[in-house]
Structures are given as structure tokens and as C-alpha cells.
Amino acid sequence: MPDDDTLDLGDSSEPENEYASWLEDLTAHFNNLSFDGIPDIPTSNRPLGELIQDHHVWSMSLSERAALLCHWDEEVREVAYDKQKEEFGRLKMRHKEAKERWEQVDNERKLAILKRAILIGCTTNGAARLTTLLNGVSPKVLLIEEAGQVLEAHVLASLVSSVQQMILIGDPLQLRPTVENYFLSMDNPKTGHIYRFDQSLMERLSSTGFHMSRLDVQRRMRPRISELVRCTLYPTLQDNDLVTKYPSVRGMAKDVFFLDHRHPEEGGGDDSVSKTNSFEARMIKDLVLYFLKQGKYTHQGDIVVLCAYLGQLVKIRKELANEVATAIDERDAVQLVDHEDDEDVANIINDDVAEQVRVSSRVLLRTVDNFQ
């Protein structure tokens, strides 16, 4: 084996020759570009306006080239945007014209069907959307059911020029139409008398003394309940013989019972739908279980719990979750989804546990507004 001082490390002049050849080629390249040798790397940072006027790219630093590239990129995007916006506007107009032609043909088809109908039924929202069709049908009579719970704006939107008679069926003394904003409701003591958005046309006409026919015989409430409204709202109300034969509520000393307590509500302001009362929720749970133990109220609909607020509805459902099967009205379910952004409602919903049925009974939970 050779000594260390005689070890052959190869030809060290080869890298130097490659570097000299690369340097020579690079110098020749810049000489062809009218440079006297290899130029220094620019480090300047000139404003954009000066860079646009400078056509000598080799004099620009890396940051200046990046700024100029960004400027050109924005210019190209603006030019393309204007062209695309113009094309979009043209296509949008074509779509609008095609949609109008399609709707015209579709309305003609619907109109031919409606003209053969004796009675046309729709919601007030549907009537407002189908004003053109209703004008084509030219109805003479407009009948509105549950008129006491319909916003006056919805009624007015349903009126077409051909209507000669409007019949309102409802009760102006019962539930008003529902408005999402409590600020606009007549129940708001501060602003209700100003906006009155939830005052129906029927209630407004009744409050001005407009004559209305009324049914004075009721076939629903037991006499102990009807007496409550007879003394306050309907002095001429009469009971049909049918309601006098209702059996008494099993397990209760009285068929009508009011409980007064001093436990305040929790959560939510005056305009909140999420007010709750833990004491009432626990009391209702115990009362429902007590009724179930009577052995008589075991079918769906035998027991109904009405809540003034969505938050209380969810809280009671949570209390009953491990004891009975609870059923929530689809309208209340929709309102719960609509109020998911409400922090108080969201907290109550998140706290709700999975329903575990231990008793073969179903208790209906409703808000007052959605119970019919």
C-alpha cells in the first residue's frame, strides 16, 4: 500500500479549467448584450413608475422585477375581468330572456288548469308569488282561513283587482301572526304601538268596530275552562252539551289548576326566544310522570305540554328524555334550526342528550304559537 505522501488525489486542475471556461462563456454572453464584462447584481429599490419607464431589465434588482411582475399580473387580470364581466352580462341577459319565455309558457299551462277549477287553494305566500296567475284567473271571492293569524301585508299582497268579496275566517282575539323580530311586535311595550307588524287585518278591523259575525257555541272546552274566556273575552259564549260530559282528570282534585311560584326565568332578553325556567321544567317532568302513573293517559296526544319559548321546550325535552318519548312539532323544529345562531338556544340544544325511551308513552311538546 502506498505511503500517504505518495497518494494520488487526481488531477486538481480539472475544476479550475471548467470554472475558467464557464467564466469565459458568461463574459462573452454579456459582451453580446453590450456589457463591458459581467455586471454587478443590482440591489436598488426604485418606485414602480420609474421601473415602467426603464426598458433595461438587467439594471433591475430582484425585488424590482418582482414588483413589476405583480403590476403586470394585475393589469392582465383587470383586462381579463372586464372582458369576462361583459361576457357574463351578455349570458345573464340571455338566461333572463330564456327564463321569461319558459315562465310564460309554464304560466299559460298552469292558467289553463286553474281556469277549469271551481276552487283554488294556496297559502298567502303562494298567492303573493302567483299574482300574475291569479289575475289571469280573475277570482271574484277571496276566502282567508285563520285570518287572525295572517299578517295584513300578506292579505293585501293576495288581493287582485278582480276580487269583489273578501271573507275573513278566524278570531281576532286569539293568537296574532308570528313575527321574528320582537321589536316589531305589539307585545313589545316600548315599540309595539308604533309598528304593530303582527296586528292582522282582521284584528285591526275588529278594533275599529267593524261588524263581524261570531259563532257563540263552543264544542271543545270543558265548562271550567270556557268560563275563563267567557268572563274576559266572550260574554255570550255558550257550551254545547257535549263538553259537559267530559270525565274529570284522573289524579287531580280539580280539572283546572293554576300554580303561582317565585322562581324567575333564566337567560335571554326581552326579545329572546330562549328564556327558560328550571323550576318549571322539573315540576312539569314530575307532573307528566305522575299522570302516566294513573294508567289512563298512555296514548300519544293524551298529554300535551305547551311552552311559551323555544328554549323552555328544549329544556323540558331534556328533562323528559330518559323517561318518555317526546314529539316536537315540525314547525318548532324548523324554528329551532333558524335560531341555532342564538347563543342561549345553541347552548341548550348542545346540552340536550340522546333520547332514551323507558315508558311506552309519547308526550307532545309544543310552543303556544304552533299548537292547533
Image (cartoon, rainbow, N blue to C red):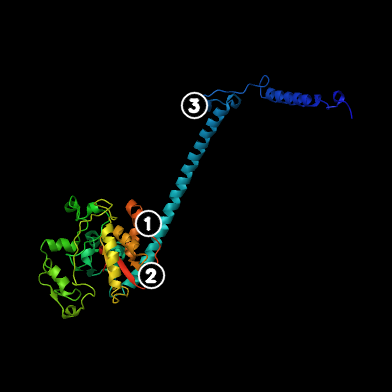
Give me the C-alpha separation between circle 3 and circle 2: 79 Å
| 179 with respect to 85 (left or right) | left
How crowded is the residue under tag 3: few (<14 C-alpha within 10 Å), some, or many (20+)? few
| 50 with respect to 257 (left or right) | right
- Which residue has dot 1 on it? 351
Asked if disc 3 and disc 1 are in contact, CB closer than 8 Å, the reply is no
Image location of residue 186, percent across then percent down: 19, 55
The label number, if any, that marks residue 214 in the structure image: none
Q: Secondary structure at mark 1?
A: helix
Residue that extends furthest to the right in the rendered view of this protein: 1
Image location of residue 37, percent across then percent down: 68, 20
The label number, if any, that marks residue 49 in the structure image: 3
How crowded is the residue under tag 1: few (<14 C-alpha within 10 Å), some, or many (20+)? few
Q: Quadrant of residue 30?
A: top right
The N terminus: image quadrant: top right
- Which residue has dot 2 on it? 358
- Mark 3 or mark 2: which comes first in sequence? 3
- Mark 3 or mark 1: which comes first in sequence? 3
Seen in the picture, residue 68 relative to 187 is either above or below; the reply is: above
Image location of residue 195, percent across then percent down: 20, 52
Q: Quadrant of residue 169?
A: bottom left
Q: Secondary structure at mark 2?
A: loop
Q: How many marks?
A: 3
The C terminus: image quadrant: bottom left
Closer mark to the observer between disc 3 and disc 2: 2
Give me the C-alpha separation between circle 2 and circle 1: 20 Å
Image location of residue 43, percent across then percent down: 57, 23
Give me the C-alpha separation between circle 3 and circle 1: 61 Å
